Amino acid sequence: MGGRKVAEVDYKADARNILFALQDEYGNEVPALFSENMKSLAENYAQEQTEDALKALGQEITLAHYLLYTIEEDSDSYVLALISEEEEQDFVQEMKTLKRKAKVLLQPRKKPGSEAKRIDWGKRLPYKVYKMPEKLRFTPQAPIDGLYVADSLHLRDRNVESGLLSLDPEPHVVHKIPKILENLTGGDGRYAAIWQNPERGENGTLIDRASYIAVGTNLANISEWKVIHKDEERSWEVCYWYGEHLFLADKNKAAVIKNAMNGGKAPEIILESKENELTFPK
């Protein structure tokens, strides 16, 4: 525009896309666009409104003695120009000659040369810190009746501890589980679990590498659940109930055990992929 390069971004673009567009257009002239400060700022503003992200990035780039301008256009995009401080007067005059409105992008009550204000997510999103029971770690698994899986697998102890954890009012073990739970699903008296036996050898590895599929009606007696399948070859990652059938998945296979609570045992492979990893196990 007027002989100057510009970068164009969608009016709903997030901070990371804006930064990428600026890097693509001006990266050779402005190496600061690739700095860790700019990257972390784009992450910090990733969920913010596009105009707020633009002002934050514009504020930060002033540390490298550049100014970020938006040029008014009749479109659904932001047209951006990145210029050095020395060029500012020439740029402003060019925009007047072209009868274009241009506005420098800075954060409110901040001057060029000062770093951008970061969002303090701790204040934005109130939280409470809970102390976990000794040795146990919280595992990112969907809650079962408000309970979460916790274990001590991160330690090298030969005796692995597992349990179902409640967070109310403070984290505490509701049920101890003498197994390594890979996954747990269900509710209303119908549950299923994928587990391994926890015994380790002298070198710290599991003695029994098999994956067990078990079903039961009560979380309090999980060690007594009926094992309906033992798999020596693969470790299933997730299980889900759909009607009376239990579906299983690992990184490249999906299977179903029909009527798993009422006699079903052998998994039937229903999908197999040669890709390294399917998305549904996650």
Image (cartoon, rainbow, N blue to C red):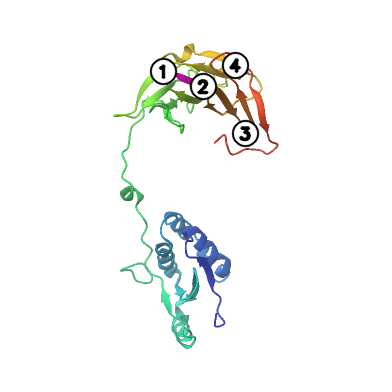
Mark earlier in primary sequence (4, 3): 3
- Crowd rating for badge 4 (residues with CA inside 10 Å; few <14, some 14–19, many 20+): some
Q: Which residue is mark 4?
A: 264
Query: Is label 1 in a helix, a strand or a loop?
Result: strand
The mark closer to the camera, 1 or 4, is 4
The extreme bottom residue here reads: 97
Chain part drawn in magenta = 189-193
Quarter of the image for residue 263 reads: top right
Alpha carbon of mark 3 to alpha carbon of mark 2: how far? 18 Å
**Residue 33 on image: x %, y %:** 51, 64
- The amino acid marked with disc number 3 is Lys
User: Which dot, 1 or 3, sits closer to the camera?
Assistant: 3
Task: Give x and y (percent) for residue 160.
Answer: 48, 20
Mark 1–mark 3 Cα distance, whole angstroms, equals 29 Å
Q: Amino acid at mark 4?
A: Gly
Q: Which residue is under mark 1?
A: 176
Q: Which residue was labeled with disc 2? A: 193
Query: Sequence-wise, which precedes: disc 1 or disc 3?
Result: 1
